[in-house]
Amino acid sequence: MSAPGEGQPQHNAIGTEALVQLAEVRGQLTMIAQLIQTNHGATHQRIDDLRQTVETRFSGVEDRLETIEQNERSTAIRAAGTGAFSGAIVAGAIELMKHFGR
């Protein structure tokens, strides 16, 4: 039989080694959590930057589209006015031809 206390040093060495390994794992988990938080913040910053860029581009496109629509309206109004004026000239010319043709 073994004397009491002979198994104790080996048991304490295993317990100490387990505690050291647990401390290492805890430290690694803490570092992983910090990395995740850092990446989370960086990802949100990238998303905010992208959103701002996209909003700026859309605003520019909307402004250009509005300018095109205004130009198109004014061109359509001018074309309609010119068409009406041309129609009046042709109608007047036809009437003149009717009166002078007699």
Image (cartoon, rainbow, N blue to C red):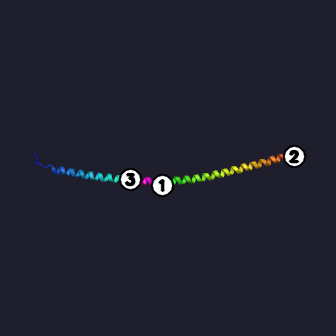
Q: Position of residue 26 (x, y in %)?
A: 29, 52
Q: Which residue is mark 2?
A: 99
For the C terminus, give its image quadrant: top right
| Residue denoted by label 1 | 49
Q: CA distance from mark 1 to mark 3?
A: 18 Å
Q: Earlier in the sequence, mark 1 or mark 3?
A: 3
- Using the image, determine if residue 57 lies above or below residue 102: below
Q: Label 3 to label 2, Cα distance in Å?
A: 92 Å
Q: Residues within 10 Å of mark 3 (few under 14, many from 20)?
A: few
- Disc 3 is placed on an element classified as helix
- Quickly name the residue at label 3: 37
In which quadrant of the rendered image does the N terminus lie?
A: top left
Q: Position of residue 29 (x, y in %)?
A: 32, 51
Could you tell me which secondary element the residue under label 2 belongs to? Answer: helix
Q: Are marks 1 and 3 in contact (CB under 8 Å)?
A: no
Q: Is residue 40 magenta?
A: yes
Q: Is residue 63 left or right of residue 14?
A: right
Residue appearing at x 21%, y 50% in the figure? 15
Disc 1 versus disc 2: distance between alpha carbons?
75 Å
Amino acid at dot 1: Asp
In the rendered structure, the answer to whether residue 45 lies left or right of residue 24 reads right
The reply, left or right, for residue 101 in relation to residue 63 is right
Number of disc labels:
3
Pick whichever of labels 1 and 2 is earlier in the sequence.
1
Mark 1 crowd level (few <14, some 14–19, many ≥20, 10 Å Cα): few
